[in-house]
Amino acid sequence: MNSDKLAIAKSVEGRQEKIWRISDAIWSYAELGLEEYRSAKLLADILETAGFRVDRGVAGMPTAFIATWSHGSGQPTIGFLGEFDALPMLSQKAGVPKKEPLVPGAPGHGCSHNTMCTAQALAVITLKEVMEKKGLSGTLKLFGSPAEEILTPRPFMVQAGLFQGVDVVLDCHGDSAFQVTYGMEGTAMYSFIVTFKGKTAHAGSFPWMGRSAADAVELMHAGTERMREHLPTTQRTHWVTLEGGEAPNVVPDRASTWYYIRDLDENVENNFKWALDCAQGAALMTQTTYEVKTIGAIHQRFPNKHLAELVFENIKAVGKPAYTEEEEAFARAIQTEAGYSVIGMDYPLKLTSPESEPLRGGSSDVGDVTLIAPTVGMRFPVRVPGSPSHHWTVVAAANSSIAHKGLTAGAKVLALSAFDLLMNPEVLAKIQGEFAELRAKRPYKTLLPVDAQPPLGLNTELMDKYRGAMEKYYINP
Ligand SMILES: [Zn+2]
């Protein structure tokens, strides 16, 4: 690293402890999608205090925010994506290497999102100082993005025009390696809830008076199971029954099912339409009615190669954090308990592409952003190697010194990469040139149905159920 870059890395370290505490506090709040009132406020407040203009409640989501700061000509504009939502049922004690919930049944940070918007905040606050000192022009825009776990926010943020004028986007995600990817990633997806309405009746005395909504749900499942056989092999289709009646002697007049329909961008709309036909068929067969509520509709991800290469140079420059014997022992204990390979904190620094990694079935709403601006997702090490996402082993490590070190390393890479983009307009031009080719091949069009709205309140009941019990474990930022 040259002296400028070394100074940036030092400056990140100078602020890290405050941000670590915020990450731990957000870990303890463990707020589900669109319920992240405390987490979003904490992040927005610290950015406002640091001199950013903060717009709260953007794109129809009370917990979405944008923090903006401009200097000089204001060009170029660099976007940063930061998430902070938790997952249901994953409560876990911090630093304990066996499955032991803090509040049984409560949400937990099983995808380490507590470290992500915090890493971005650490990066942009440091960059602001660097730009002021060096008189660098540009705009920094941190997109506080709620509800990633329900794959909701970014298409709505794009639709609201919030990414207009953004030249390049740096996304990040906690991981058990230090890596970055380019090419085509993941699957496009429709997430939606179908609710059937029938007529209730005494199932023994007057069954002919009733029309079962639960039957409709079963028949819709039967339909999509047959549909699945005839979809392209790249598809993933899964569902859970949300409501299916409460007693066998009462014909259920209301039942609902939640679907994820995933496939490549070019197939997903047809698969979704077919699934809706199954809903209609089920309603006809049972003389019930139905409605469809969209939770999310997202594209595949197409991260930029030139941008990924730039970020990878900075991953190599920052390198792996040094781990203590205690941290190595904790990693080995988790790996032994969970049945992973016992390798301690051994993980690679990687630049991956579709040629080196097979296409996997997961999805992220960052996909829509990758189609409207050159974007990359840097993955930084805040987990014990072997830990899969959405697992207690992630929660156990996400509030620990391992996560703190990873968060700092991630923030350094983000700040250094943004610094490179500000200093080298010709590199940014190359990145944008590559993006122009992608855009010509895949012009952006939202997958959201016309009347779709963010599903506010989706997690309110679940969050309310546990918030009281969780409060006594809240960590002071
Ligand atoms: Zn995640």
Image: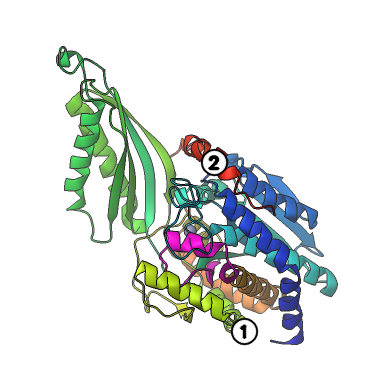
- Viewer can see residue 92: yes
Range of magenta residues: 375-403
Amino acid on which the number 1 mark rests in the picture: Ala
Compared with 388, 193 (above or below) is above
Q: Position of residue 464 (x, y in %)?
A: 52, 36
Compared with 457, 76 (above or below) is below
Q: Is residue 204 left or right of residue 146?
A: left
Identify the residue at horizontal 19%, vertical 41% (top origin).
223
Q: Toward which corner of the image does residue 415 lie, by quadrant?
A: bottom right
Q: Which is nearer the eye, 313 or 22?
A: 22
Q: Is residue 315 left or right of residue 476?
A: left
Q: Element type at marker 1? A: helix
Residue 346 magenta: no
Identify the residue at horizontal 76%, vertical 86% (top origin).
3
Q: Toward which corner of the image does residue 235 lie, by quadrant?
A: bottom left
Mark 2 lies on residue: 469
For marks 1 and 2, the one nearer the N-term is 1
* Quarter that holds the C terminus: bottom right
- Viewer can see residue 121: no
Q: Position of residue 69 (x, y in %)?
A: 76, 58
Q: Which is nearer the eye, 286 or 405?
A: 405
Q: Is residue 290 left or right of residue 51?
A: left
Structural crowding at the residue carrying mark 2, measured as other residues with C-alpha within 10 Å and reported as few (<14), some (14–19) or many (≥20) = few
Residue 395 magenta: yes
Q: Element type at marker 2? A: helix
Mark 1 lies on residue: 317
Q: CA distance from mark 1 to mark 2?
A: 44 Å
Q: Is residue 288 left or right of residue 465?
A: left
